[in-house]
Amino acid sequence: MANQIHWFPGHMSKALRNVEDKIKIIDVVIELFDARAPLSSINPQLDDLTKNKKRLIVLTKSDLADPSETKKWETYLLTKYDSLLSLNLTDGNAANVIAKAVSSLGQEKWAKDKSKGMKPQPLKTMILGIPNVGKSSLINRYAKRKAAGVQNKPGFTRGEQWIKVNNEVLLLDTPGILPMNYDDKKKAANLALIGSIREDILPNNELVHILLKYLKENYPTALNNRFNIPVIEGDDLEILNHICEVRKILDSKGQNDIVRAESVLLKEFKDGLLGKITLEKI
């Protein structure tokens, strides 16, 4: 793997400039981190831009993450941010939980409005995060309607839009923004594994190697539960051949199709089918 991973399409550069421009009028920032890789989800540029604002961190896809590790991340992140939620955005109560947290962060602003003899104005909130972290799903839950398009791939939202959540909150949606590059190879790999970097940025065989090494060290029963592989002490090829045999993944000549097996393994990890797994630990 290259020393640095570069993936910064033109629309991300434009989105970052828009955040810089709009942040001065924002009251509350809602930033989403993927619970499976919270540290890799932090964009230092966005973190610096929003450090003087009230911030709500939402750990998304918590239903796919290791619950014991999520609790540790919650404790750590609450030392750095104003408020934090861990959410499964398909949960019917998610909208109420988000609304309560945002309202709590808006109390100070509304009190200032009243002290000036003004009617409390709607909170201007901004939603930020890396690609494919669940921003559109959160918006649709929060606004209680389909206000944003949803796809399970990075880079789906390209422009910004203001959304009226209710009479108290206006929400500015933004595209997913990654750092310009990743000096840390592991962070880049984590983002590729959870689907926040386009699949063609990193070779599948390298991602498979990183994933299998991590599973061996931290979740040794994951492959047995999914593919009936009793031990994962063998090398990558041995494990992939086993997956081919269990799933009948064959090429046109009837031989094990290792390339397809790699894709199957990566997709089933991303979809949470290997179990509740967190790629980063405190």
Image (tube, rainbow, N blue to C red):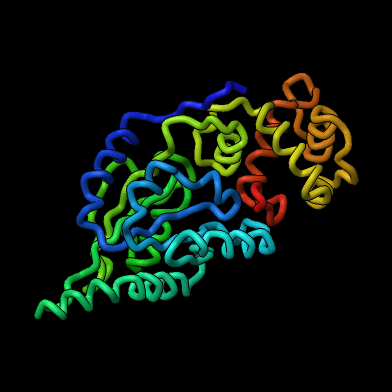
Residue 243 or residue 142, whichever sits in front: 142
Q: Is residue 114 left or right of residue 269?
A: left
Residue farthest along the left direction in this orientation: 117
Q: How far across and how far down the image is residue 231, in percent? A: 89, 43
Q: How far across and how far down the image is residue 42, in percent? A: 48, 47
Q: Is residue 30 above or below residue 10?
A: below
Q: Quadrant of residue 211?
A: top right
Q: Is residue 62 above or below residue 209?
A: below
Residue 217 or residue 228, whichever sits in front: 217
Q: Is residue 27 left or right of residue 181?
A: left
Q: Quadrant of residue 2?
A: top right
User: Which residue is located at x 60 percent, y 59 percent?
Assistant: 73
Q: Is residue 240 above or below residue 267?
A: above
Residue 102 or residue 202, whichever sits in front: 102
Q: How far across and how far down the image is residue 28, in percent? A: 31, 62
User: Which residue is located at x 30 percent, y 56 percent?
Assistant: 126
Q: Quadrant of residue 212?
A: top right
Quadrant where the image shows the N terminus:
top right
Number of numbered discs overlaid on the protein picture: 0
Q: How far across and how far down the image is residue 233, in percent? A: 88, 37
User: Which residue is located at x 65 percent, y 52 percent?
Assistant: 272
Q: Is residue 263 left or right of residue 96?
A: right
User: Which residue is located at x 51 percent, y 58 percent?
Assistant: 60
Q: Is residue 34 left or right of residue 151?
A: right
Q: Is residue 35 above or below residue 75?
A: above
